Image (cartoon, rainbow, N blue to C red):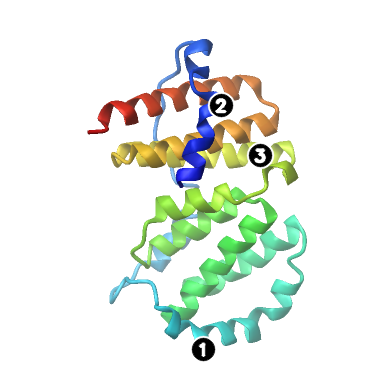
């Protein structure tokens, strides 16, 4: 994420210009995600499957969901396809295939510029596998082409990014918090929300200051 951190230079000091920033609270996990995440919890190894274990799973994915994925060429189609993958993943007992189902849903979210789908895919995967969920979600959001988003989806991306910034800050991972908050600034800019952009920029500066101060 170094390239994303470097991109914050142009907005450095913007928060100082805009004034004080409000108290931020950790956002609740989306209600629609919680039941599915609870259903994913299980015993056994929690490591993501190695590439060699994904060969057969990838073939099965194409056989079972090829038509669904083929039709995922629009925002609505991608969301419907992702929902099918989420539903299948909840009851899937083959761990490599379950991982692929969720990873494909995440890819669809990136392709469609759907931050909510990305967020749900990573959240559900984290319920069954051990990996750096915060970093993966930030990287996934960073690959969404903001210029292709309408105002609503850009605002949604900004909201998801702000939640990630808060989670990263709570974990003491200030570098990731700065990266996530920069995504929020860019998202609100794309959404045309000046007040939210101002608040996000102020918070970005606050996090960046904390990161620099905490550096050895």
Q: Quadrant of residue 189?
A: top right
Residue that mark 3 sits on: 154
Residue occupying the point 39% across, 35% down: 26
- Whether tag 1 and tag 2 are in contact, CB under 8 A, the answer is no
Q: Nearer the viewer, mark 1 or mark 2?
A: 2
Residue occupying the point 56% across, 20% down: 198
Q: Position of residue 132 (x, y in %)?
A: 37, 57
Answer with mark 1 or mark 2, whichever residue precedes in sequence: 2
Residue occupying the point 37% across, 41% down: 168
Q: Position of residue 80 (x, y in %)?
A: 69, 63
Q: Around disc 3, counting alpha carbons within 10 Å, would you say few (fewer than 14), some (14 to 19), or many (20 or more)?
A: many
Q: In the displayed structure, would residue 214 be above or below residue 79?
A: above
Q: Quadrant of the image for the C terminus?
A: top left
Helix, strand or loop at label 2? It is helix
Q: Position of residue 6 (x, y in %)?
A: 49, 37
Q: Nearer the viewer, mark 3 or mark 2?
A: 2
Residue occupying the point 66% across, 51% down: 113
Describe residue 214's horizontal placement relative to residue 102 as left or right: left
- Whether tag 3 and tag 2 are in contact, CB under 8 A, the answer is no
Residue that mark 2 sits on: 10
Q: Quadrant of residue 22?
A: top left
Answer with mark 3 or mark 1, whichever residue precedes in sequence: 1
Q: In the displayed structure, would residue 52 be above or below residue 77?
A: below
Helix, strand or loop at label 3? It is helix
Residue that mark 1 sits on: 56
Q: Around disc 2, counting alpha carbons within 10 Å, would you say few (fewer than 14), some (14 to 19), or many (20 or more)?
A: few
């Amino acid at each position: 994420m170094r390239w994303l951190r470097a991109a914050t230079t142009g907005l450095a000091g913007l928060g100082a210009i805009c004034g004080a920033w409000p108290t931020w609270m950790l956002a609740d996990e989306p209600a629609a995600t919680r039941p599915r995440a609870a259903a994913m919890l299980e015993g056994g190894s929690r490591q993501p499957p190695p590439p060699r274990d994904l060969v057969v799973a990838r073939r099965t994915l194409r056989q079972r969901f090829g038509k669904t994925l083929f039709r995922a060429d629009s925002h609505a189609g991608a969301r419907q396809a992702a929902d099918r993958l989420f539903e299948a993943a909840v009851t899937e007992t083959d761990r490599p295939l379950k991982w692929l189902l969720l990873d494909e849903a995440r890819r669809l979210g990136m392709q469609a510029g759907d931050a909510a789908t990305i967020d749900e895919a990573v959240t559900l995967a984290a319920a069954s596998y051990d990996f750096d969920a915060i970093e993966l979600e930030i990287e996934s959001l960073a690959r969404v082409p903001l210029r292709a988003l309408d105002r609503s989806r850009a605002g949604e991306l900004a909201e998801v990014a702000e939640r990630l910034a808060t989670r990263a800050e709570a974990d003491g991972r200030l570098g990731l918090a700065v990266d996530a908050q920069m995504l929020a600034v860019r998202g609100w800019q794309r959404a045309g929300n000046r007040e939210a952009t101002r608040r996000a920029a102020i918070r970005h500066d606050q996090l960046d200051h904390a990161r620099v101060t905490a550096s050895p």
